[in-house]
Amino acid sequence: MGERQQLTVRIPPDLSRALARAARLTQRKRSDIVRRALSEYLAAAHSTDRPADRARDLIGSLESGVPDLAEKHRRYIVQALRRGR
């Protein structure tokens, strides 16, 4: 790992308060939180994954209680819209 670089960023007061609150709650330094957030943002920005790929393990994991939902989904949607749901 090379020499650390310093970066000064101006942020609005509401973001500053949110950052200070997060630092207090997690007992971390503000700079640690910003470094981690920036690292995660940059990793996600270069990801070729589609949103569905990131949630692949969740797809189909919920039980609706409707046995033929996949086959008759349009009918159920129309019914729900008519009921105002």
Image (tube, rainbow, N blue to C red):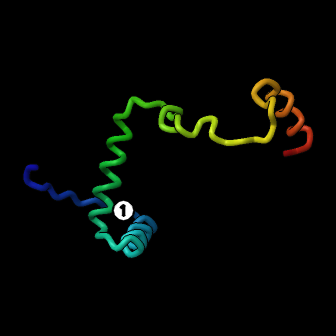
Residue appearing at x 41%, y 69% in the figure: 22
- Residue at screen point 79% across, 31% down: 69
> Percent from the top left, x then y, of residue 78?
87, 32
> Residue pushed farthest top?
71
Residue in the foreground of this view, choosing between 18 and 50: 50
Is disc 1 surrounded by few (<14), some (14 to 19) or many (20+) residues within 10 Å? few
Q: Horizontal placement of 36 versus 79: left or right?
A: left
Q: Secondary structure at mark 1?
A: loop
> Horizontal and vertical percent for residue 27?
34, 74
Horizontal side of residue 77 vs 36, given as left or right? right
Q: Quadrant of residue 43?
A: top left
Does 15 appear above or below 62?
A: below
Residue occupying image coordinates x 79% and y 29%: 73
**Residue 26 sits in quarter:** bottom left
Asked whether 14 or 2 is in front, the reply is 2
* Front residue (pair 62, 8): 62
Q: Which residue is mark 1?
A: 11
